[in-house]
Amino acid sequence: MGTLFVAGMNHRSAPIEVREQLALEEDKLRGILADLTDRGLCAEVMILSTCNRVEVYGVADVPGEARAAAFRGLGAARGVSLQQIETLLYSKTEEEAAVLHAFRVAASLDSMIVGEPQILGQVKDAFALAQSCRTVGPTLHALMTQAFSVAKRIRTDTEVGRHAVSASYAAVELARKIFGSLESKAVLLVGAGEMGELAARHLQEHGAMPVYVANRTWSRAQDLAHTLSGTAVPYERFAATMAEVDVVITSTAAPEPIVRAQDVERALHSRRHRPLFFIDLAVPRNVEPAVNDLEGAFCYDVDDLRLVVEANLRERQKEAQRAETVVEREVTKFVVRLRDLEVVPTIVSLRDKLEAIRRGELDKALSRLPAASDETRKVMEALSQAIVNKVLHAPIVKLKNSSREGHHARFTELISELFGLRRSSQEREP
């Protein structure tokens, strides 16, 4: 039937330099999902790939083999071997641990910024992608459906997400430490991503102005500039515009750095080495690492922002503990439900077998009673159904109890032999 497992890396286990290499485009993820199921390594699988985590959720007979194949495929796209990342990976092959991890991730309790809302949307997108690739079966469907429900409940019943703490807000805190005041500090936003826009808005709330927007799509740059009451600049001129601003926010999907050290050096020279602050929200990073070596240039990527985030999370900790209690209760309930799923095919097959016998024998009996009234037929129908239900009761209860106790295999085999059920009926459909 396969084992539910979770394997991956996140902001705690792997540095951004590694995570950004495994952050793949949707078409490449589709290929990996298809490969894992086509080769029979996973009965079910989905891949969550964000700037802070790359995780594989799957059902496999040999989870270790499936994990290795998945990360071999993820690394191959960027020339990274499994050996290079093996020590950075975690695996959760115990059923309860895998479910707990899934629920905590969806509820944003495992995020770099506890309570941030983006992760739930990212998990939903990963689930939708796997569904479109037909790699989701009953186990992952039940797991993710419940994970979404738990996340919603935590958002509603606790205040873990009430305080506005985000990577973009953390960037503002860093900017304030560098400049003291953000009043009249000019901002250049390169890229029109949501996180970049949020950072720009936070800066504006603290007095930063004016705002310039550069994007590869001119119309998008104009629209966002209008939204921010700023000015659009041609994408090819963003490097020159750096000399005119104090803060540069980058959030593009470029696969390689777009902000070069030589361009920043020219901008600093024009500014007479007045500080230039970079907020790099992209993965892979948009700003060349060498920029940090320039005097007067301050660059922070998503990993650097974590230091500020930690200082802003104290108010959420009490609510996070309440949320953890909710998650633990939900995990216990779901594991029982998940184990019930393991015996459902046998229960369905058993019920179908007895129903077929009941229907056949009832038809034979009624054929000998052509003059039987409708009332008599209804009584015989009800009688035969009652007998089947009573016969089914004990084996179904035993199957469910054995499943919850973790030793259902022996009973499914025994019942299958006793009632002559097909072996395939015990196997969960993908």
Image (spheres, helix red, strand yellow):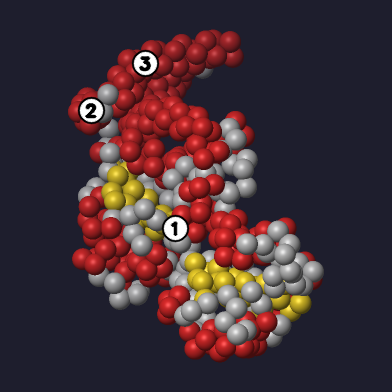
Residue 140: name its quadrant.
top left
What amino acid is labelled 1 in the image? Asn
> Which label's residue is closer to the chain start, 3 or 1?
1
Q: Nearer the viewer, residue 87 or 162?
A: 162
Disc 2 to disc 3: CB gap under 8 Å:
no
Q: Nearer the viewer, residue 206 or 344?
A: 206
List the residue tagged with mark 1. Answer: 52
Q: Give the residue at x 67% y 59%.
A: 202
Q: Position of residue 174 (x, y in %)?
A: 55, 60
Q: Nearer the viewer, mark 1 or mark 2?
A: 1
- Against 56, residue 226 (above or below) is below
Q: In this view of the protein, can residue 166 be seen by the observer? A: yes
Q: Nearer the viewer, residue 46 or 258?
A: 258
Res 241 label? none
What amino acid is labelled 3 in the image? His
List the residue tagged with mark 3. Answer: 393
Residue 184: name its quadrant.
bottom right
> Badge 1: few (under 14), some or many (20 or more) residues near its Cα, within 10 Å?
many
Q: Position of residue 121 (x, y in %)?
A: 56, 52
Q: Give the residue at x 58% y 49%.
A: 165
> CA separation, marks 3 and 1?
49 Å
Secondary structure category for the residue under label 3? helix
List the residue tagged with mark 2. Answer: 407
> Which label's residue is closer to the chain start, 1 or 2?
1
